[in-house]
Amino acid sequence: MRNWVSRILVALLLVPGLGVLALDSAFAGECRLAPVPVLTANGESATYKVTKVDCAAGVTPGAQPVVVKGAPSCDIKSASPATFCVGSLPCFTKDSVVPWVHPATKPPTPDSKYSVQLCFTNNSWLGTAVWNGPATQPPSMAVQATSAVGRIHLPSAVLSFNPTARTLVNLPTWFWAQGLTSEVLRGSSALGLVAYATPARLEVTPGDGSAVLRCPWVTVRPQVPADQSGPCSYAYFRSSIGGSARGPDGAPAYEASAQAFWSLRFELNGAPVQIAGAPSELPGPVMTTAVEVGEVQTLVTGTG
């Protein structure tokens, strides 16, 4: 009785169109090879054993599985009817068949249908029910723009100032970003989208509690007299005796900081493009330096 039920179940579960593997010479004759599914208890997956079926009298259908020599590589032709690879396994899909329960996971959309994905492994076809959701959509243009900006390589720089040893109260202190370039920076392509960064400005925080200085793009020491203001300069109005940083000689100093900003534009496959929600500028890393500020005491005496 059990053998009869097993044969009925195997006949119901045979999946048409799986294709027939090449016959081994040892099984020539009236037998043919076919993948026979063996379902798991929950019906979510199955192992398809390549087995002799429809044999002549004296040969038992469903005998020992055929041994395929060599481990399967992901050569589609090595495991007909495979049409794609999952890792190193040749695979193909079929429409869902009965009795086969749907995948345990939720469908990606209400109208999603499922199929059976079969992969050839360990000389057998391993089948699993999978959802056939909509094709993966590319990220939005705003997300692509963020990715493109992330492909821009920013040069390293340091915040320099003059006078370098120690500046004085009410004396202009010049700042510049040593190591930056005035060239336009180009990122690598992100799905055809390329970001370009054009030097825009420097923002310097003197460190004494005063407001941020918005300066032009300064990358070298300005060529101006020492007592005059440069393109990015600031005159401290009190000494750094209470500063939190330390100068080269260990004396109290202000911790000045600066950040470079580039303006951004984008090209899609070589053509300029405006992208809603895309970043408009790119801030560089924060640069810091210790500025020691001294105060010169003067004594005025009367004469005559």
Image (tube, rainbow, N blue to C red):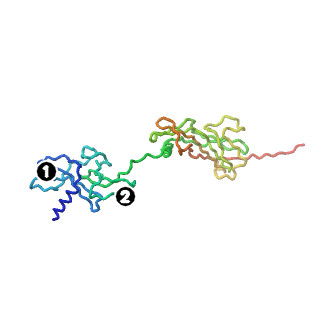
Q: Residue at x 64, y 41 (%)?
A: 215
The local secondary structure at tag 1 comes to: loop
Marked residue nearer the N-terminal end (1 or 2) = 1
- Residue 282, how many percent across, how many down? 55, 43
Q: Are marks 1 and 2 in contact (CB under 8 Å)?
A: no
Q: Please name the amino acid that badge 2 sits on.
A: Thr
Circle 1 residues within 10 Å: few <14, some 14–19, many ≥20: some
Closer to the camera in the image, 162 or 201: 201
Circle 2 residues within 10 Å: few <14, some 14–19, many ≥20: few
Closer to the camera in the image, 129 or 149: 129
- How many marks are shown on the rendered structure? 2
Q: Which residue is mark 1?
A: 31
Q: Please name the amino acid that badge 1 sits on.
A: Cys
Which image quarter: residue 76? top left
- Residue 139, how many percent across, how many down? 45, 46
The single residue placed furthest to the bottom in the displayed view is 1
